[in-house]
């Protein structure tokens, strides 16, 4: 399956993003955003709050995150310097939009090549705001069951130190499970020890063909891949088809006019013919 999902179709009700993980009134905010066929602009914290309808507590955590990013950027190359002044749009909003496309019952999330925490750590902060209340679309964990957990995989130890500091200063560790693994995802030990998640995400990590090779050991039957891509997304999908069978949707990014969210299900390597 391969088709492009346009934002206008979402707005008219023909299809809609999964919303069970979306905190509070974020689902309504997404309805308004998706009704527009052009990306929105998030210039600052106030714009983010208006667009995603987050709580004051969540906004305060993101503001603390921004302050730490600016502080650490002086010593550690966390993001491209040219994007630092547009952090609420290029990094926070770009990451936050993924929650609308997570499975309805998703509780566990693995982010590959997390870097400065985009998108995985932003997702974790927003998931904290989702109340464990079935009436709000987020079921309480069953007795003895799994609570919400986000795993960030990053091989750079200095970036991992930054991620841990953001978790510590925002205080989200007491509200949601956040695991920070300083390792390479392609190692057999990592793949064997990480439970199969509901969602695998990545941004600017590798071309889709390579990304599937890295992430497919983490996929269970119901796992969904959410990969933020640029204007080459369609070409990457076509290239990946040479080596992989998978169900895929291309979803218009709400932060970049040429960006796409590549939503992948059930990736399987193609069997190579003898002699090829």
Image (cartoon, helix red, strand yellow):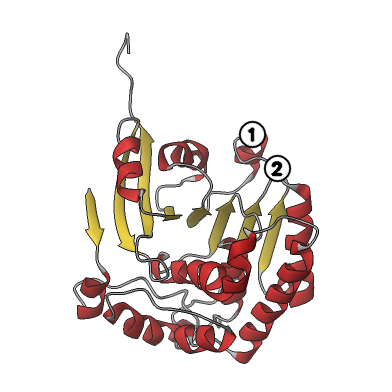
Q: Callout 1: helix, strand or loop?
A: loop
The residue lying toward the viewer, choosing from 18 and 263, is 263
Label 1 near label 2: C-beta < 8 Å? yes
Which of the labelled discs sits on residue 187, or is there none? 1
Above/below status of 131 relative to 269: below
Q: CA distance from mark 2 to mark 1?
A: 8 Å
Task: Name the residue beneath numbered marker 2.
Answer: 183
Please report the residue visible at 73 percent of the width from the left and 47 percent of the height from the top.
Answer: 156
Disc count in the image?
Answer: 2
- Residue 172, image x, y percentages: 70, 74
- Residue 154, image x, y percentages: 67, 49
State which quadrant residue 146 falls in.
bottom right
Taking the view exactly as shown, the residue that stands out farthest to the top is 275
For label 1, the crowd category at 10 Å Cα-Cα, with few meaning under 14, some 14 to 19 and many 20 or more, is few
Q: Callout 2: helix, strand or loop?
A: loop
Asked whether, in this view, residue 261 is left or right of residue 189, the answer is left
Please report the residue visible at 29 percent of the width from the left and 55 percent of the height from the top.
Answer: 249
- Residue 105, image x, y percentages: 44, 67
- Residue 26, image x, y percentages: 45, 83
**Quarter of the rendering occupied by the C terminus:** top left
């Amino acid at each position: 399956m391969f088709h492009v999902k346009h934002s206008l179709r979402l707005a008219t009700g023909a299809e809609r993003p999964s919303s069970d993980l979306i905190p509070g009134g974020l689902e309504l905010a997404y309805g308004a955003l998706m009704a527009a066929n052009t990306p929105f602009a998030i210039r600052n914290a106030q714009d983010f709050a208006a667009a995603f309808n987050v709580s004051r507590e969540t906004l305060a955590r993101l503001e603390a995150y921004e302050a730490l990013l600016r502080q650490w950027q002086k010593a550690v190359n966390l993001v491209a310097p040219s994007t630092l002044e547009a952090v609420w749009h290029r990094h926070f909003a770009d990451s936050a939009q993924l929650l609308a496309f997570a499975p309805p019952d998703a509780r566990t999330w693995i982010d590959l090549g997390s870097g400065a925490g985009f998108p995985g750590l932003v997702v974790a902060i927003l998931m904290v705001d989702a109340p464990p209340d079935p009436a709000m679309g987020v079921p309480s964990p069953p007795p003895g069951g799994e609570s919400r957990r986000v795993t960030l995989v990053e091989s750079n130890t200095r970036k991992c130190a930054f991620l841990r500091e953001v978790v510590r200063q925002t205080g989200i560790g007491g509200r949601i499970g956040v695991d920070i693994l300083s390792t390479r995802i392609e190692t057999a030990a990592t793949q064997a020890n990480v439970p199969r998640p509901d969602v695998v995400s990545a941004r600017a990590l590798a071309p889709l063909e390579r990304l599937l090779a890295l992430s497919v050991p983490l996929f269970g039957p119901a796992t969904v891949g959410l990969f933020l891509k640029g204007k080459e997304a369609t070409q990457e999908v076509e290239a990946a088809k040479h080596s992989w069978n998978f169900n895929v949707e291309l979803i218009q990014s709400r932060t970049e006019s040429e960006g796409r969210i590549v939503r992948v299900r059930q990736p399987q390597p193609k069997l190579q013919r003898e002699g090829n």
